[in-house]
Image (cartoon, grey):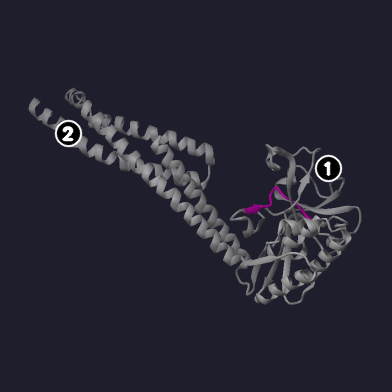
């Protein structure tokens, strides 16, 4: 049990390390070569103030629309919007459960990403079939909304298919994204949002209507690209002027450092627990093997006197050790499937097994069996 617990903890460490490295690499793809920093906003507005804004009616909508236009049209910086605050609800769908965001709780809710045109450039989205969004797609051009589907949807939909959601909206499929297209939001941790099973629609502010939550969600999910932090203050001043939100801005680089520090602390905590458990587990296994050798010394001597080989005795020791390792590895495979995490854990378990058997095999080679054999000659 101790070896199993240690290997499970070790697999979680590998999982964290591989995830954060993958996240760093993807983030570098986005910010590499850019002189400007990308900033995300954290809404510090009190819940009472947010309720006031949401329930503010037409006046609130007008003020939020003005703030949104100030941010999007400001010549001092660039922006892109990526809103994941809503889901695509499809009750009448033949999609399998792996496409749902939370199959156990909401089997009809699917990942929906609303984007503006600049998002396409920042994350370099491309289609393997059909086309990417055009400038006109971000305008209210009629009853049907153009939609991009993730790579995996090609089994279920074709170009120009119409999709109707539970709210009565109609979408026309214009393209399928390339495999492993992705989106990052450091504000939501080190998660890479793979878009292979995502619905992506263009942000169309003309369709917001009288729903103030659309403006709140869109403004909060708009990212600022600038090399001058003073521009961020200008946004806050405009928001204060309109009696709206209070923001704190952090760059992707700053947020990444926080994520790295949080994961470093997590790894150290798990690593400390794993080390203690692993030490006791290795000591326990070695002690059991020593006891096994001591108890069966005479049996081993008779075996050798009758023409047996030391190899068969060594095999018995190996089987006892690696059977325990194998059971632990099987459980790791069940949890992590066949993945780099599993491969690294299995390799580590083999190393642990080798460490365990070194002393018992050395002891076996120096045990009284050799003396018994000499006396018998």
Comparing 224 with 310, the one in front is 224
Image position, residue 311 (x, y; %): 26, 32
In this rendering, would 207 be left or right of 82? right
Q: Residue at x 80, y 69 (%)?
A: 242
User: Which residues are the magenta region?
Assistant: 192-202
Badge 1 crowding class, 10 Å Cα cut-off, few under 14, some 14 to 19, many 20 or more, is few
Image position, residue 241 (x, y; %): 78, 72
- Is disc 2 placed on a helix, strand or loop? loop
Point out the tag, 1 or 2, that comes first from the N-terminus: 1
Picture quadrant of residue 286: top left
In this rendering, would 229 be left or right of 245? left
Q: Tell me if residue 18 can be seen.
A: yes
In this rendering, would 318 be left or right of 120? left
Q: Residue at x 39, y 38 (%)?
A: 3
Comparing 152 with 185, the one in front is 185
Main secondary-structure element of the magenta-colored stretch = strand
Read off the residue under disc 1. 166
Q: Quadrant of the N terminus?
A: top left
Label 1 – label 2 distance at C-alpha: 76 Å
Picture quadrant of residue 4: top left
Read off the residue under disc 2. 367
């Amino acid at each position: 049990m101790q070896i199993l617990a240690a290997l499970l903890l070790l697999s979680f460490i590998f999982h964290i390390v591989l995830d954060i490295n993958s996240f760093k690499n993807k983030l570098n793809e986005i910010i590499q070569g850019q002189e400007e920093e990308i900033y995300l906003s954290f809404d510090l507005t009190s819940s009472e103030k947010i309720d006031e804004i949401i329930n503010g009616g037409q006046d609130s909508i007008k003020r939020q629309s003005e703030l949104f236009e100030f941010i999007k049209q400001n010549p001092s910086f660039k922006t892109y919007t990526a809103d994941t605050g809503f889901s695509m609800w499809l009750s009448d769908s033949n999609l399998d459960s792996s496409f749902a965001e939370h199959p156990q709780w909401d089997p009809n809710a699917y990942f929906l990403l609303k984007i503006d045109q600049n998002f396409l450039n920042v994350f370099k989205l491309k289609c393997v079939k059909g086309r990417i969004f055009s400038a006109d797609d971000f305008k209210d051009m009629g009853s049907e909304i153009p939609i991009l589907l993730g790579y995996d949807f090609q089994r279920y939909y074709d170009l120009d298919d119409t999709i109707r959601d539970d709210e009565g909206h109609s979408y026309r499929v214009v393209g399928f994204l390339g495999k492993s297209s992705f989106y990052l939001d450091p504000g939501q941790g080190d998660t890479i949002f793979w878009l292979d099973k995502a619905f992506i629609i263009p942000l169309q502010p003309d369709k917001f209507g009288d729903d103030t939550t659309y403006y709140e969600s869109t403004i909060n999910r708009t990212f600022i690209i600038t090399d001058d932090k003073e521009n961020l203050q200008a946004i806050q001043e405009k928001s204060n002027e309109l009696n709206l939100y209070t923001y704190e801005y952090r760059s992707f680089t700053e947020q990444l450092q926080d994520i790295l520090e949080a994961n470093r602390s997590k790894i150290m905590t798990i690593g400390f627990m794993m080390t203690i458990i692993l030490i006791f587990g290795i000591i326990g296994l070695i002690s059991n093997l020593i006891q096994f050798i001591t108890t069966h010394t005479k049996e081993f001597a008779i075996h050798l006197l009758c023409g047996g080989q030391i190899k068969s005795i060594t095999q018995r020791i190996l089987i006892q050790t690696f059977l325990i390792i194998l059971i632990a590895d099987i459980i790791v495979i069940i949890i992590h499937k066949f993945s780099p995490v599993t491969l690294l854990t299995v390799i580590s378990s083999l190393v642990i097994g080798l460490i365990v058997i070194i002393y018992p095999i050395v002891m076996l080679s120096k045990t009284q069996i050799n003396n018994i054999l000499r006396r018998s000659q």
